[in-house]
Image (cartoon, helix red, strand yellow):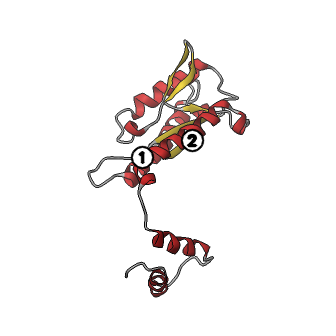
Amino acid sequence: VYLVTFSMEWLVPTASSSIQQQCLSFLRFWLLSIAVHTRDATGRVGAPVILVGTHKDVVQSAREHEAISDLLHREFGAHPVWAGVEPFRKAKVSTGTGLLWFWPVDNKLGRDDVVVAEVMRSVERLVEAEEYIRRTVPLAWIAVFDELRADERTAIQFEELVALAAKHGVPA
């Protein structure tokens, strides 16, 4: 699961065109990076993405949030990653509760912001739904991994790794 954050101040309709373009370029870079690094063997982009708009304390209006959401959808709706973007379905919009393509948060409130709590629950739900979470791994591999993590060195010799694996019964 990837969280991509941006300041809503940069995408409000009153922001300068150059600031908006700079923010969209930043988002395009990170979405493309996610696309490149999560492509599976079939070429499908397979990682859930949550777009998080910060500074809700400054950009409070539901209409501004809707305008930002519309802009994001127009700019990135055809992007290969877009199918994996998790919409915020419980957003406060001008007509009540609705869908936004990003999650507006007041980062000054931290966990006290209800949307931050929603993001955390959604990340947990999305991770639990991933196939790799249910994949079984031999206990010997976990023992090797645990020992590698406990080692404070940043690198080890290949021969050391082979010996460590053999120690735990992992075939060479």
Residue type at mark 2: give it: Thr
Q: Is residue 22 visible?
A: no
Q: Which residue is mark 2?
A: 5
Residue type at mark 1: give it: Ala
Q: Is residue 66 visible?
A: yes
Residue closest to the eye, 172 or 77: 172
Residue closest to the eye, 108 or 42: 42
Q: Which residue is mark 1?
A: 47
Report, in whole angstroms, how far the alpha carbon at label 2 lies from the one at label 1: 16 Å
Residue 91: x and y in percent read: 56, 24
Q: Quadrant of residue 169?
A: bottom left
Q: Quadrant of residue 41?
A: bottom left
Question: Residue at (47%, 82%) from the top-left corner?
Answer: 161
Question: Residue at (38%, 32%) from the top-left corner?
Answer: 77
Residue 137 to residue 35: above or below: below
In this picture, residue 53 sits left or right of residue 24: right
Residue 80 to residue 9: above or below: below
Q: Quadrant of residue 114?
A: top right
